[in-house]
């Protein structure tokens, strides 16, 4: 700890924001590079921490402060607390990170009965002086003495009423004098003491109040909400600066500016000002400010100075600045500067422009943009000006916004979607067989499941908005309605989803379309040049692959083949395969699937050529392809009723004395037909019951399934290799990679490898070609991490499936955790992040590090990537870079974010 606790603006280290706060450091920096800042000094954040610890100002602090005030008096020719030409100061908070409006500020400190006279004589403006005095008494009373605004407001309103004026501007000097006197009385009454006339006492109390505001409820809540930890910002500095006035005449003004337009990033004077006004007038909206451009004609000399100020700020900070200025009697002062907050489009444009202007390097152009910000540019967003109120809230599972009619099942979604309607698929949770509904829907809403639930993962892959786990919504498919709090949503009612916030609205809310600009393309090209990590996409269809390429993916890191099984033309065949009683029946069904899978792969490989495509062999448990037990029982009951009707009809027909011609449809109904359907459903029910598992995610899935039914994996491997041959014959360069899921031991890999080797040898012989492909494993079980040395001996690549790995490491169900207990864990700080979203580097990360080290030790050229949802998350990407991975794979629409994050990770 340093012992010096007070730094003049002319001596403080402009880079030490931790010690001086952001505002203080910038005031020092600006002073030292020759920008006209009123004289002042900073009391350090360390002094704040000392104060909070001891509940008393550190010994000697006020002596240091007095010394600084003496220097300010010298520099300004004014005196503090005395005389003709009084020095007034502002006392402002400022921590290492900006926390707008969270801590306290006092202006015009130094006014008392004596200096008030001085101010009146100096300015010749009694009204101005009393206005400053009454503002100061109230602000000081509130911040330093804890007197509520209402005590002051009551008197202010009383005087206004007496004077018969409606707006504050109508009050004259006499009224304001009376208000000041009443305010002094309020202080006496409420605090039990006179308002301090000793200006050093004022200063002392103000400094203490600013220090205390660091632990005020507002500030503490803000830090919790925005995850501001003590290593990011600890304590507030206090900035004490000579007051300058923008309201001393027509050669005075006050204003705010941005060095570039924060709306679109264009390079122009941007901001507004008011002549003969104080900062409060701008904030209070009493007068309408003018655009800075007007200053060119109104105050041409000062406008030139303002342009020079703007250029100097950008030139020095190499960043767009958001600054405040005041003009006092023709002299321009800069009172504050900080990095400008802009929307994503403006950030991207200013990055590319500032590089072309030679102001910043490509590296800086990349690092200054938070990759997550790009989300704004990639999906439609709700118009932020829309006043709509949400009717339900769920997890923001896939970004973007869209409106459509509620539909409660995938078949109807498909039907209406194909007829050109905009629909939102609303389900309790989605299942693989709902996939056709996803294709047709504008968005997905579920009342169960988290960010790695089926609905979330599939929607993200398709770039469609999804709100998952909105537990306030209760879906009743049989009644075709859903309850959302007090609202009843009927099928056909229009709703809007915001997948970026998790909000659900009634009716159609206007959206803002995404903007993928040339500037963004350029920036991402630079990112690719810099990054070590390659960015691939998780994609299962040629359309998704095409989209992913447009987003800049250089391959597919995960093709989940089960998605292909769910398309409506294959699901019946897949069901036949599952219902098969013996191998021969199963093989017959698989023989029908083989050509379909081959075509799938040919299309996928062709779209991605010449980049690699990683195909994962079938992973989910079989029951996912069958209806639920509940649905089947429903269907069986309906069929039984139907059979009774058919029997009754036949009996009635037999009893008819005269047989007349009956409508064809009626006469076609046969009991046999219904019985056949019933038998099939009952078989299915039996199978569903056989396949039922208590924990299916930890049950008969992945490679365990592939070993139990080797002909399924054999069909998929054959389809992949035949697609490779077909593409090669067509002159398309392809690099397939076969990936095995859920592996725990090398013996499992050996099993699958044998099939791969046999089939490739056979096909190579048959077609007279050499087949080039890779064989690899997912690493998504804890055992796979611990046995990485052995697994690496059998494969050419590892791909971390961090969805399952996180589930396994935490022993949290990925389907339930996010809307059951995780929010509570996050809110109470037991877990800072949702581990299914932000990679848990401390736990899961340790296993990844271990598996990478062991795998590469065994096989130095082992290719390693990640394909869990974390592959698209910037902080997780940084970890992957540090862990030495070769690639990340994420849903297509997150590819641009991942590209930028991969470059940032390299540069950080
Ligand atoms: C994973 O577990 O991380 C993974 C990518 O596989 P899935 O989400 O399909 O289980
Ligand atoms: Mg998995």
Image (spheres, helix red, strand yellow):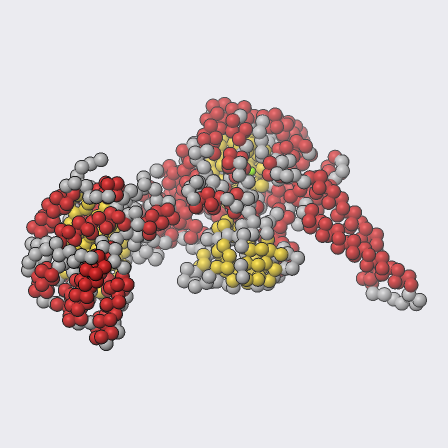
Give the side of residue 791 with respect to residue 532, left or right. right
Q: Position of residue 352 (x, y in %)?
A: 34, 49
At which x and y percent is residue 51? 23, 43
Against 468, residue 128 (above or below) is below
* Quadrant into which the C terminus falls: top left
Q: Quadrant of residue 876?
A: top left
The foreground one among 61 and 580 is: 61
**Is residue 403 shown to the viewer in this render?**
no
- Whether residue 205 is situated above or below residue 383 in the rendered picture: above
At a point 77% along the width and 54% down the height, the residue shown is 639
Residue at image position (66%, 50%) is 568
Image coordinates for residue 631, horizontal then vertical, percent: 69, 50
Question: Does residue 671 appear in this view?
Answer: yes
- Quadrant in which the N terminus is drawn: top left
| Residue at point 21%, 73% (across, down) | 170
Relative depth, front residue between 900 and 156: 156
The residue positioned 51% from the left and 29% from the top of the image is: 785
């Amino acid at each position: 700890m340093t012992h010096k606790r007070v730094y003049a603006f002319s001596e403080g280290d402009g880079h030490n924001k931790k010690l001086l706060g952001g505002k203080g450091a910038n005031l020092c920096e600006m002073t030292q590079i020759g920008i006209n800042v009123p004289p002042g000094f900073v009391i350090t954040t360390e002094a704040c921490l000392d104060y909070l610890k001891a509940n008393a100002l550190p010994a000697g602090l006020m002596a240091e402060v007095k010394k600084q005030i003496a220097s300010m008096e010298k520099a300004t020719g004014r005196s503090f607390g005395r005389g003709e030409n009084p020095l007034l100061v502002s006392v402002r908070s400022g921590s290492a990170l900006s926390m707008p409006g969270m801590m306290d500020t006092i202006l015009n400190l130094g006014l008392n009965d004596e200096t008030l006279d001085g101010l009146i004589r100096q300015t010749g403006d009694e009204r101005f002086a009393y206005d400053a005095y009454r503002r100061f008494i109230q602000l000081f009373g509130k911040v330093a003495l804890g007197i509520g605004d209402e005590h002051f407001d009551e008197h202010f309103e009383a005087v206004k009423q007496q004077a018969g004026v409606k707006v504050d501007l109508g009050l004259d000097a006499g009224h304001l004098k009376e208000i000041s006197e009443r305010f002094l009385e309020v202080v006496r009454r409420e605090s039990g003491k006179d308002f301090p006339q000793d200006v050093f006492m004022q200063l002392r109390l103000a400094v203490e109040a600013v220090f205390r505001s660091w632990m005020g409820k507002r500030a503490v809540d803000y830090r919790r909400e925005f995850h501001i930890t003590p290593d990011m910002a600890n304590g507030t500095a206090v900035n004490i600066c000579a007051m300058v006035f923008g309201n001393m005449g027509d050669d005075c003004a006050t204003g705010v500016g941005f060095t570039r337009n924060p709306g679109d990033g264009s390079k122009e004077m941007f901001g507004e000002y008011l002549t003969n006004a104080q900062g409060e007038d701008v904030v209070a909206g009493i007068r309408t400010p003018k655009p800075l451009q007007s200053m060119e004609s109104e105050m041409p000399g000062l406008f030139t100075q303002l342009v020079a100020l703007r250029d100097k700020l950008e030139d020095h900070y190499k960043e767009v600045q958001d600054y405040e200025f005041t003009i006092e009697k023709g002299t321009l002062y800069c009172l504050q500067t900080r990095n400008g907050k802009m929307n994503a489009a403006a950030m991207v444009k200013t990055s590319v422009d500032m590089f072309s202007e030679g102001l910043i390097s490509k590296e800086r152009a990349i690092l200054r943009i938070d990759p997550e910000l790009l989300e704004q540019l990639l999906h439609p967003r709700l118009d932020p000006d829309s006043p709509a109120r949400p009717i339900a809230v769920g997890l923001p599972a896939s970004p973007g916004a869209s409106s459509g009619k509620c539909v409660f099942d995938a078949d109807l979604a498909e039907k209406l979607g194909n007829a050109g309607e905009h629909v939102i698929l609303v389900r309790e949770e989605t299942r693989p067989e709902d996939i056709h509904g996803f294709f047709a829907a504008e968005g997905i809403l579920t009342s169960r499941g988290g960010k790695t639930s089926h609905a979330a993962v599939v929607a993200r892959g398709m770039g469609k908005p999804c709100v998952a786990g909105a537990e306030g919504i209760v879906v009743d498919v049989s009644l075709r309605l859903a309850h959302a709090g007090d609202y009843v949503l009927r099928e056909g009612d229009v709703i809007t989803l915001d997948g970026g916030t998790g909000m659900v609205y009634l009716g159609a809310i206007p959206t803002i379309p995404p903007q993928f600009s040339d500037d963004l393309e350029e920036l991402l090209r630079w990112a690719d040049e810099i990054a070590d990590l390659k960015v691939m996409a998780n994609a299962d269809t040629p359309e998704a692959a095409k989209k992913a390429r447009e987003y800049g993916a250089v391959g597919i890191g995960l093709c989940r083949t089960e998605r292909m099984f769910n398309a409506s033309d294959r699901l019946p065949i897949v069901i036949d395969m599952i219902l098969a009683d013996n191998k021969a029946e199963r093989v017959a069904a698989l023989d029908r699937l083989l050509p379909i899978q081959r075509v799938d792969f040919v299309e996928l490989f062709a779209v991605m050529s010449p980049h690699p495509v990683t195909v994962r062999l079938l992973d989910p448990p079989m029951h996912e392809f069958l209806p639920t037990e509940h649905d089947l029982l429903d269907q069986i009951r309906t069929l039984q009723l139907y059979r009774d009707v058919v029997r009754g009809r036949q009996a009635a027909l037999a009893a008819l004395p005269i047989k007349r011609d009956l409508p064809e449809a009626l006469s076609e109904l046969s009991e046999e037909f219904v019985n056949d359907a019933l038998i099939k459903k009952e078989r299915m029910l039996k199978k569903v019951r056989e396949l039922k598992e208590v924990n299916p995610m930890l049950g008969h899935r992945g490679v365990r399934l592939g070993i139990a039914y080797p002909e399924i994996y054999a069909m998929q491997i054959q389809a992949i290799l035949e697609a490779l041959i077909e593409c090669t014959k067509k002159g398309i360069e392809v690099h397939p990679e076969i990936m095995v899921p859920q592996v725990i031991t090398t013996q499992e890999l050996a099993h699958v490898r044998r099939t791969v080797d046999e089939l490739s040898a056979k096909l190579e012989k048959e077609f007279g070609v050499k087949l080039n492909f890779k064989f690899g494993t997912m690493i998504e079980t804890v055992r796979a991490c611990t046995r990485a040395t052995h697994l690496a001996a059998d494969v050419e690549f590892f791909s971390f499936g961090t969805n399952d790995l996180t589930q396994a490491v935490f022993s949290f169900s990925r389907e339930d955790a996010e809307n059951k207990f995780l929010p509570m864990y996050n809110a109470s700080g037991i877990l800072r992040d949702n581990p299914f979203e932000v990679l848990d580097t401390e736990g899961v990360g340790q296993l990844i590090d271990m598996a990478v080290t062991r795998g590469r030790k065994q096989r130095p050229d082992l290719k390693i990537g990640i394909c869990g949802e974390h592959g698209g998350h910037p902080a997780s990407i940084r970890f992957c870079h540090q862990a030495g991975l070769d690639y990340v794979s994420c849903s297509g629409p997150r590819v641009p974010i991942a590209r930028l994050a991969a470059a940032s990770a390299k540069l950080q």
